[in-house]
Image: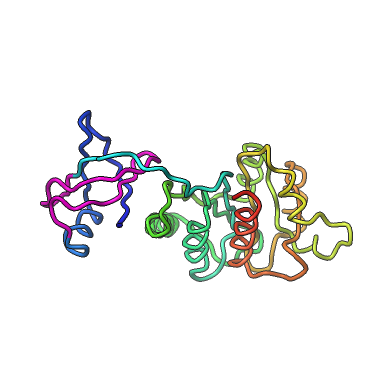
């Protein structure tokens, strides 16, 4: 059954209005009609709803709340150094499917691309659309928060806002005493919010690593192999899902 995230506040009698592209999708693509049902996600809660009117907008009535266990038990924010091309779109889509709570893009020392002004706004809006569609497709009850592009300094400053911050740093893979990702995950059962930091192509610089370490972040390697910038976040989310779900 098709799922839609609805921003409209439900009325006292349980009616909601679906507008914009979602209304067009219901009427023109799905060709649904009055009396048919759909899944409505409102403020993180999932409901079975029935269509009561279709015009330019679609009105639905909530029938009952449904049990939902689609969210990771940990709130994971993925911080990605800006990569080339459309890699961040791929990360956004797949990480949403894997349970990401938020995406924090940042301008890293080794980021080749730069997002400034209007370009940044357009890119972020595109990522928000991708996250919404992926959340609907994967039956999430939460659309990941796509944050504005941070400078590296801003990234380092928000480390303290999380229960734990973990940096995927390829230099750790070369150390015989480096801490394994699995070992870190086993210590996080009493933690709720997790920040995972990944570099762009070329990885995190030594200067950035030192700043993140000073901010209190933990460092790990994601196995003995070097992963692409678009692969590493998905590897980490899969490991978190395996450990905690």
Q: Position of residue 50 (x, y in %)?
A: 20, 46
Number of numbered discs visible in the structure rendering = 0
> In the rendered image, which quarter contains the N terminus?
bottom left
Left or right of 154 on screen, residue 21: left
Q: Residue 73's image quarter?
A: top right
Instruction: Give the colouring mode of the picture.
Output: rainbow
Which residue is depicted at the point 52% across and 68% down?
Answer: 87
Which residue is depicted at the point 56% across and 61% down?
Answer: 82
Left or right of 129 on screen, residue 218: right
Which residue is depicted at the point 17% across and 62% down?
Answer: 31
Of 59 and 218, the residue lying toward us: 59
Q: Residue 131's image quarter?
A: bottom left
Q: Position of residue 182 (x, y in %)?
A: 74, 55
Of 45 and 208, the residue lying toward us: 45
**Residue 86 vertical position relative to residue 158 in the rendered view, above or below:** below
**Residue 202 vertical position relative to residue 192 in the rendered view, above or below:** below
- Can residue 94 be found in the magenta stretch? no
Q: Residue 181's image quarter?
A: bottom right
Q: Position of residue 10 (x, y in %)?
A: 25, 35
Left or right of 114 on screen, residue 109: right
- Can residue 33 be found in the magenta stretch? yes
Point out the stretch of residues depicted in magenta.
32-59
Q: Position of residue 144 (x, y in %)?
A: 46, 49
């Amino acid at each position: 059954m098709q799922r839609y995230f609805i921003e409209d506040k439900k009325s006292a009698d349980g009616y909601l209005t679906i507008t914009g592209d979602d209304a067009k999708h219901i009427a023109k693509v799905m060709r649904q009609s009055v009396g048919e049902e759909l899944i409505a996600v409102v403020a993180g809660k999932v409901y079975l709803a029935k269509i009561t009117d279709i015009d330019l907008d679609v009105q639905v009535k909530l029938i009952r709340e449904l049990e939902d266990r689609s969210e990771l038990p940990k709130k994971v924010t993925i911080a990605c150094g800006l990569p080339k091309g459309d890699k961040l779109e791929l990360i956004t889509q797949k990480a949403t499917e894997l349970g990401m709570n938020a995406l924090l893009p940042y301008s890293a020392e080794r980021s080749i691309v730069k997002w400034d002004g209007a370009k940044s706004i357009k890119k972020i809006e595109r990522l928000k659309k991708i996250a919404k569609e992926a959340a609907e497709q994967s039956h999430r009850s939460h659309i990941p928060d796509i944050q504005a592009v941070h400078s590296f300094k801003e990234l380092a400053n928000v480390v303290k806002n999380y229960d734990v911050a973990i940096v995927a740093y390829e230099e750790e893979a070369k150390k015989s005493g480096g801490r394994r990702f699995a070992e870190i995950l086993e210590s996080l059962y009493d933690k709720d919010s997790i920040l995972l930091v990944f570099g762009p192509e070329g990885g995190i610089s030594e200067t950035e690593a030192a700043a993140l370490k000073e901010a209190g972040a933990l460092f790990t390697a994601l196995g003995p192999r070097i992963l692409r910038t678009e692969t590493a976040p998905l590897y980490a989310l899969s490991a978190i899902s395996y450990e905690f779900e």
